[in-house]
Amino acid sequence: MRVSPPAIEESLSRAEAAVSAGESLAGTGFWRAVSEVKRRPELVDRYADRIARIDAQAHRNWALLIVPLRLGTVLAIVVTLIGLASIWWAYHLTGWAQVLIFLAGVGILLGSTHTLAHLVVGRLMGIRFSYWFVGEVSRPQPGVKTDYSSYLRTAANKRAWMHASGALATKTIPFLLIGAAVAAELPTWIVWALAGLGVAMILTDVFWSTNASDWKRFRRERGYV
């Protein structure tokens, strides 16, 4: 059932009042209105900036920590370089020190490349970003906040692949590092562990992430194509 422009206006007004009072968007009809705008590209220019302002305020009300975009990006790149340096350092070590440093590098790269992939692919697709953030103590992995105005003005297929990029980047890391483990002459079990990790992450995506997280968003945006 389509949502009429007057109903969209009412939902956005309720959402504006809610976020101004520091409340969530629950019960305002905001996301239903957003979905309608996505389905009807002729409404995007009319509502994109207003939706973006509401979304930004709601997100700031929710986020635990906000970091400026440039600073957060620099920190993410530095962490990624530390992960790569750890892999390189492992080539010059032996025994358990080599194994531990290599695995530390793997963990760092898994954590740092996910959101960087969203950022890089999103910018290539024309999506702008506002800042980095940590949403909750229970989910400390940082994210990067989309500028919803540019998000809505980007084609749905491109939005979908921006969401998929983080998952795709993360899933390739274990397989890419198999060669590094072999070159460093690490124990064979490390190679099998990397392969197993990669397969397990793919299976997790297949059975869980299609209904939550990045792949859920991918499927949602593909539905607007």
Image (spheres, rainbow, N blue to C red):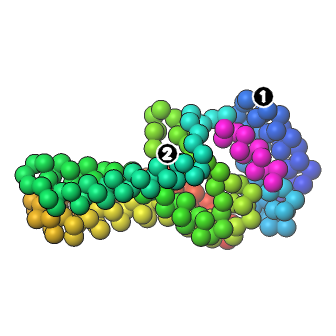
Residue neighbourhood size for the residue with mark 1, other residues' Cα within 10 Å, grouped as few (<14), some (14–19), many (≥20):
few
What amino acid does circle 1 point to? Ala
Question: Considering only vertical position in the picture, is 63 above or below 192?
Answer: above
Q: Place residue 167 in its image quadrant.
A: bottom left
Q: Position of residue 159 (x, y in %)?
A: 62, 65
The residue carrying mark 1 is 21
Compared across the picture, whether 215 is left or right of 79 comes to: right
Q: Position of residue 126 (x, y in %)?
A: 66, 68
Magenta segment, which residues? 49-60
What amino acid does circle 2 point to? Pro
Q: Secondary structure at mark 1?
A: loop
In this rendering, does residue 87 appear at all?
Answer: yes
Q: Residue at x 49, y 45 (%)?
A: 142
Marks 1, 2: nearer the viewer: 2
- For this rendering, which residue is in front, 170 or 97? 97
Question: Considering only vertical position in the picture, is 84 above or below 132?
Answer: below
Marks 1 and 2 in Cβ contact (< 8 Å):
no
Compared across the picture, whether 30 is left or right of 144 comes to: right
Distance, label 1 to label 2, CA atoms, is: 26 Å
The residue carrying mark 2 is 142
